[in-house]
Structure formats: C-alpha cells, structure tokens
Image (cartoon, rainbow, N blue to C red):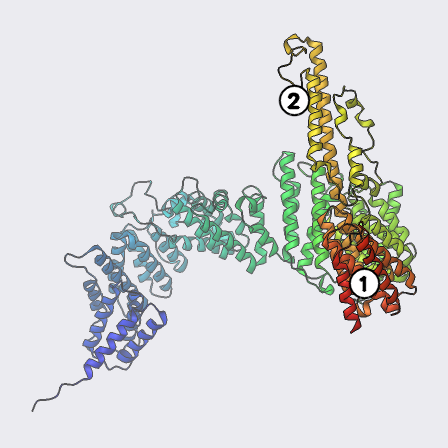
Amino acid sequence: MSKKRGREQPAVDTQLVEIYEDLANVDEKIRLKAAHTLLTNFVSEGKATGDQLNEILRRLIRGLCSGRKASRLGFSIALTEFLTELLGPNGKNVEGFQGISGLIETLKTLTHAAGNVSGQEERDHQFGRLFGAESIIKSGILFQSGTTSEAWDQVLDVTYDLAKKKPWLREECGFILSTSVHNLRDKDLKYSQLVIDKLQTNGLSKTSEGIAIWIAAQSEIPSIKFLSGVWHHDDPLDRKELSRLAKILKEAPAAEPAKDASESKVPQKGAWSSNPHFAWDVILAKLLNIELAGLKERKKSKRISFVDFWEQCVDDNLFAAPSSEERKFWGFVLFQRMIATAPVHVVPGLFTKNFMRCLTNQLASPERYLHRTADRATKAMVARARTHPSFSSPILKALLTSPHGDVNFDKLTKTKTVETLLSQADKSIFEQLGAIYNELILRPGVQDEREAASRRLIIADQLTSTVRNMHIESKAQKLESNSQHVIIRSFLSLLAKYAYFDLEKAPSGQDNRATPPISQASRQTFRSRISSCLTHLVAQTRIDPAYYPHHLITKIHGQGGNPNFAPLLLEADGRVREVINTAWERLEKVYVKGYSIPPETSARDYFQSITLLYSLTILQVYNEDPEAVIMLAELNDLFKGKLRSKSSHEKNSSALVEILLSFISKPSQLFRRLAHQVFTACAANIDEEGVQSMITILETKESLSGQAEMFDQDDGEEDTSEASDVEEVDMVDAGSISSPAENDSKTDDSDGTPESSENDPDGTDDELAAFDAKLAQALGTRPGNEDLDAEDSSLSDEDMDDEQMEAMDEHLEKVFREKKKVTSKKTEKKDAKETIVNFKCRVLELLEIYVKQQHDNNLALSLLLPILAAIRTTTSPLVSSKACSLMREYAKLCKGDGVPKVKNADTVFELLDAVHTEAMKEGSNVYASVCSQASLLLVRVLVSHDRECLRRVVRIYGDTQEKALFDATCKVKTSFFTDWQNWCTSARK
C-alpha cells in the first residue's frame, strides 16, 4: 500500500511566494511587514532547514537583481535582517547554512550576467551586486570579534571594482563606503585602514567619492594612516588644494596628468544627476562644524574656511556665467540645503556675486530655464526666516545692500521676497532692520542724485508696505509691548528722521551725513509715506486711533528739542513757535484727560478724536503746510481753557467744522479719515452755524468762480490784464471767440444743466478758426477756408528781409502763446470742477455721519432743501448719487422713535411748501423720488407733533396737484402723488 504524499511543503512555498511578492510592493509598510513575516516564520522559529535557508538566501539575492516595482528596497532590507539573524553575534547557527565566505561567493555568482544578455539586464545584475554588498556590510557580520578581515577585503574588492568599472555606480559605491567608515569608528582599526588603502590602490582618492571617504575617515578615526603625497598635509580641505577640490567637485576632466597608472584608468562619469554629489554635503557639513567650533582648528590645520570654499567651489564654479544650466541647478540645490541648516553668522557668505546675479536673472522671467529652481531658493529663505526670525536680518541685508544685493530686489525679480521677509520680522531684530535701512537711506550706493532719490523712494515704499502688512492687535493694552507695534513705531521713527530733520547739521560724532545729500523731493516722499502709513493705522487701531500719530509727533517733538540730535527742518519764527508750544500744552492735557476716562465710552472717544486732530495738525505744521499754522492757532483758541468736559465745546462747533472742512479739502485719505473720526465724536455738538458751513459747500457752483469763492481766490477768468501782451496782436475776426468769462457765465446761469465749453463743438471750432486767422495774419497768408486761387498780395519768404523775419517770429510767438493760454483755461475749468465735486462728496460723507447720529435732531431738517438742490443742480453723477443715498438714509432713519420732535409746526409747514416747490422743478425720476421722500419725512414729523396737522398737509398736496394739472411750468412727477397715496393708505391702518 503506497504512502500518501505530504501537503505541508506546498503550503510553505505558497507562503514564500506571497512574501516575495510583498517585498517588491511600492508601499513601505507592506514591504516591512513581509520582511518581518519572513524572519518570524522561517528564521526565528528555527523550523527551516539549512537547505531551505540557502534557497531563501539565493532568492533574496536574485530579488536584488530585479527592477520590478520596489524589489531592491524590499529584498535588501530582508537580506540585511536575514543575515543578522543567522550569522550575527546571536545567530541561529543552522546546520547546512553557508558561512560568510560562501555568502560572498554566492553573491558574486548570482549577480554575474553571463552569456549574451541585454544592457538593461547587465545593469540590473550590477545593481543587485551593489545592494547585496551593502546588505552584507549593514548586517555587521563582517566585523564581529574573532572574524578575520579577509571577508571585508573581498567585499571591498567587489565595491571598489564596481566603482572603478561602472562610473554610473561610483557615487552609490562611495556613499556605501563613506557610511561604513562612520560605522567603523568603534571597530578594529584594520577595517577602516583597509578602506583607505584600497582607495588609493584603485586610484579613486582624487574623486568626489574619494574625498568624501577621506574626510569621513579623518573625522571619525583620527589615528588612521593616510598615504602621503595625495593631498597637501594629507588633507583635501587644505588651502592649497582649493582649486583642485573645485575641479574635482565640478566633475570636470582632470587638468593635470595622473601620478600613477591606477589614477589614469578611472573613467569619467557620463551621465548628469539632478542631485549634487553627496561629497558636497560631506564637505559643507565638515566646514560648518569647523566654523561652529571656532577658528583655532582651521588655523592650526591651514584648512579653507566655509566662505572661501563657497566662493571658489560653488560661486566661481557652479554659478559662473559660462557654467551650464545643470551646474547652476546644482548650485541652487546646495543653496537651499545651506540656507535651511547653516548657522546665522554663515548666512551672509551664501549670497555671493555670481549667485545673486544668477538668482536675479532666473527670477526675472518665468520663461527662464531655472526660474522654478530659483523660486524655490527664495522660498527656502522665507521658510528659514519664518522658523528662525533672527535670520531675516542677514538675509535682507544680503538681498538689499552692496556689494551684491540691490534695494530694488523685489521689482527686479518680480517677487515679494523682501516684503514677505519684512512682514515676518519680530521685535528681536527690529534694531538690526532699522540699522540696515538707515544705512541704505544714508548711502544708497550711487553718486547720482536722481538715482539716489529713486532708491530712497523704493526704501520708503518697502517700509510703508511693511507697516501696512502688519497685523495690528486691536486691544489697547497690548499696543506698547506687541512686537508688531514695536516694529511699526521703529519704522515710522526712521521715516520721520529723514522727513523732518536736517541731518547735515547733526552734532559731531553722529554718522548721519547722507551721500549724496537727501533732496527735498526725497523728504517729501518720506512725508507722504508717513501719511500713507498713518492712514492705514488710524483705520486699523479702532480702540485708539490716535495712538500712532500721537506717538510719532511726541517722538519728533522730543528729538527736535534735543541738542544732541539733528535740528528740525522747520524754520519757525517766534509766533509760530508760540503756536506750536501752546498746541503741545493743549495736546498733552487732552491726551491725559482721555486716558483718565474709562475705555469704550463716548467721552473717551471724544478726547481721543481731539488728540488725533491735534496730532495730525501739528504734523502738518512739520510738513511746512502754510495753512497748518493757522488751523493750529484756531484749535488753540477753540480749546483754550475748556478741556474739562465734552459739553463745554458746544459753542465752538462752527470753528471745529471749519477746521474739519479744511482737512477734507486736501487730497489725502489720512485727513479724510481724521475728519470722519473727529466729526463722529463731535456730531452731537454741531450747531446751526456749523451745519450751515457744510450747506454752503453744497450750494457752491462747480466752476472756476465757485472755486474762487470757496477758497477766497481771485477769479482768473475775469482778470484779463495778464494777457495784455497777447492783446497787442492785431486780432482777425476776434469777435467770433467768446471770452472765458462769457463762457463761465453761461455755465453758471444754466440752472443745473450747464453746457460746458469744453464739450461744445461749436465753441471749439470758433477757437480753432480764430487761431487759424491769427496764424494766417502772422504768416501773411490767407486762412484755409478762403479762396486759394485768389491773388496773394502778401510777401513771400524770399521777399522778406531780416527785420521782417524777426517781426514775423514775434507775431508767431504771441499767437502760440494765446493758443496755450486758451488751452490752459480749459484745464483750469476742468480742474476747478473736479475740486468742487470732490469737496462736495467729502461734505456729503460728513453729513451722512451727522444724519446717522442726529436724525432725530430738528437741526437736521435744515439739510433737506440743500440736499434736494444739490441733486438737481449738480453736473456730477457722483455728487447726485451720494446726495440721493443721504436722503434715503435720512428718510429711513426718521421713522417711529427716530422722528424729530418739534415745538412749532409752522416752520415745518414752511419747509414742506419749499420741498413741494422743489418737486415742481424739472428733474429726473430719481430727483422726483427723493423729493417725495423728503416730503413724506416732513409729514411724519408733523403727524408726530399733532395728527390734526394732516388736514393742512392734505391741502398742500392738493394745491401741488392742482398746479400739476393747470400750470405748464409745474414739472412734478406722477410718482410724487402715488407715494403720498400709498402713505395715506398705510397711515389709515
């Protein structure tokens, strides 16, 4: 009877197949799990026989020769642990399993590509041999006590043979040997000595791999003996070896003949790798360690410094203009590694001449070959500065200052590198940043004044941008200590230093002399940037909007009175100084009073607004604004001895309004915000005179005469004496040209529908015709519209003598001067209209604030007619739109409890009659709508006072409707009555 075949073995084979499959998986976790299963089931438990283990060994080595998926990674890990378990110090000592010598022979045999094989298959076997040698080294079985160095000698022969004969494997071989040297520091010296001896025997000492191995041996095993004559002082980092070191790392062909036959047989690499050779990292790490340890070791051994190595081997080799894009790519990769790891004192040495040139060029255009690589370099700078803010200062200094940086770096590279670095800075380095920018302003690196002014403009913009990008803490108690606020105050003080002080007259001993001197235009630039910063800061710090302006003014005032500091540029006489000193006394009282009041109260808001008003008015004095001193004197009079309470200023509201109007008349967002801030705090105290001041602005004509009336100027249109020299020209058909004054009068009398002369084609044609006539007269020819065939009695150019030619030149000069004056008048008219329109818009914004706060105040009712008139008469859609919005907002707020309470209904009825009269005038549908809203607002006021008033209201609407039916001049819209009927319907319910 036959015996049944066992079924255990197939199960084991199936499990091994699954393990081998998982060892090749791309997922690292699956590979590690498969290796663990192999060791647990077939080695640790001791169930496998020697033959089975030999077969597993052969299968693992064959797996190293496979390029499928991640086979080499998975099988090399398994092989390393497999050998450690079986042949290591605590090995299983399984009978029948081959020893170390047999293992090495098996590796050679299974990784030898015999026969006629393809190039790819041969490369796979070479990789398998390399990975196998690495696994044997990593397993540690070659370095056990009692083990001879013969096996290590054989593995070294395998590795060096691959490195010598296969250039594309040399770097991997060198990395394995360099790593093994690090691991041999605690082993017998014979093992590491053998590595160095074979390095020279195989002629690899003067290769990148040889340098890395040599340095590793020097660092880890000082007692090792090196072959003499290879490097000066047996050190590849010796100063005399710098040029040769650069040549080797560049991987260029040898510039000098080989000293022995072994060196000459080393083939050069043929393929380029995107990653720089690992020898770069070894050398740079060694030099950084020397830098950190100090200069003693380098001086004693005559070694090169990190900066010398970087300049010659990286900058002059990889970033040189003739270098290939591939070598420049290596340079950028090395820079990214160094900027992420180098100590702060080494960072300036990374920004060398050729690197900065290459970085700027590559960043300038996305089309550049290395643009993305250069962009990663800038991101590496930003990342290091983000995690270590102390790096911001040396990086910014390198990017912005000479000899290799440029203050315009962001613009040249089309990036925001400098801006981002500045925004990440903290208060620990603000003094360093201030010193950098102080030096850039004083000495921008050029002698040409225009170029220096341009660079100072860029610096001012960078500081401004930094301030505007800062995140401002909203809580007042954090303003003094918050790091962002420390930097903001520092940058504002720096801008003020060059905006308001005469540094040329600074006391001796202070290095504040600018080269070239700071121009007045640059000072104006700094002042405008301060204004821009304050505009942003006042809007952001809502808890205390006066904080930064007051701090800045205090700084300027304090330094201006300090004899140890440069004097102020402001040349003030005794009267002006008295005004300023009085203002300072008032300001300090207001400031102290404001902070003595609990926060988030209307009283504190009021005093903070006055502090802001005083601070910015004083700043305007320092800006040498001729009107600022007058405004400051008015403020002094306004608050003279009346700082005890908020209510004490009610009688002075008209003067305050006039001051605020003077602020909003300026083309500055800062003063616009200031006016809004102060007006909001003082709206409840505005009296009838103050409201009338704003109404007067709305009633101003949008013309030159209106501008002259508003700003107390002479109307240039009516003064013709200035053109006396032009009037001496004999005018031909001059009556066809309307005078500017006549054109203006036509505009003013148009009652809301002006026909601007600049839009009148007829007027333009008349002016051109007159100009042609005058030009023809001066030239002695006929105008172009006259008969060209007529006999020309004028003298030709050839008949004129010198005196006649000079006379004609004078005539031509006067004619063209007249033409220029006409053009200038048109520009003046246009500018005047824009000025008035902008002023009206700013006033409407103030009135909107007033209406929102004081809509239940009877005084607000006086705004209705001026607003309606402004909508009807303005030629600006913007003014009309703002005025309509204001009326709608007012009508919306005056409902329920928000309706004003009046004592006398007669004044309201008079106002209602006037509104109906306005509604009867010609206007758009929008104008009719706001008239209706104004009328119904007044109706609500009357009803709230006494419902019996409705009877008279009905009669007023009836009279208006009667006029609409029988009076042709009444242009009231039907919607006016429809809205009234709808209101009546809702009022009945």
Mark 2 sits on what residue?
A: 785
State the residue in front, 184 or 777. Answer: 777
Sequence-wise first label, 2 or 1: 2
Q: Would you say the residues marked 2 and 1 are in contact, meaning their CB atoms lie under 8 Å apart?
A: no
Q: Nearer the viewer, mark 2 or mark 1?
A: 2
Question: Judging from the image, what secondary structure is the residue with disc 2 in?
Answer: loop
**Relative to 396, 640 lies left or right:** right
The residue under the point 82% across, 57% down is 962
- In the rendered structure, which amino acid carries the disc numbered 2? Asn
Q: Position of residue 350 (x, y in %)?
A: 50, 49
- The correct choice, above or below, for 746 with respect to 538 in the image is above
Q: Residues within 10 Å of mark 1 (few under 14, many from 20)?
A: many
Residue 26 in the image, given as x and y percentages of width and height = 33, 67
Kindly state the secondary structure of the residue where label 1 is placed: helix
- What residue occupies the far left of the structure in this picture? 1
Q: Residues within 10 Å of mark 2 (few under 14, many from 20)?
A: few
In the figure, is residue 382 to the left or right of 507?
left
CA distance separating discs 2 and 1:
62 Å
Query: In the figure, is residue 922 to the left or right of 213?
Result: right
Image quadrant for the N terminus? Answer: bottom left
How far across and how far down the image is residue 412, in percent?
A: 54, 43
Name the residue carrying label 1: 937
* Residue 589 can be seen in this image: no
* Quarter of the C terminus within the rendering: bottom right
- Image quadrant where residue 776 sits: top right
Residue closest to the eye, 34 or 870: 870
Q: Can residue 447 be seen in the rendering of this structure?
A: yes
Amino acid type assigned to the residue bearing label 1 in the image: Leu
**Front residue of this view, candidates 359 and 745:** 745
Instruction: Check residue 211 in the rendering and tell me which mark sits there, or answer none.
Output: none
- The residue sitting at 29% across, 58% down in the picture is 194
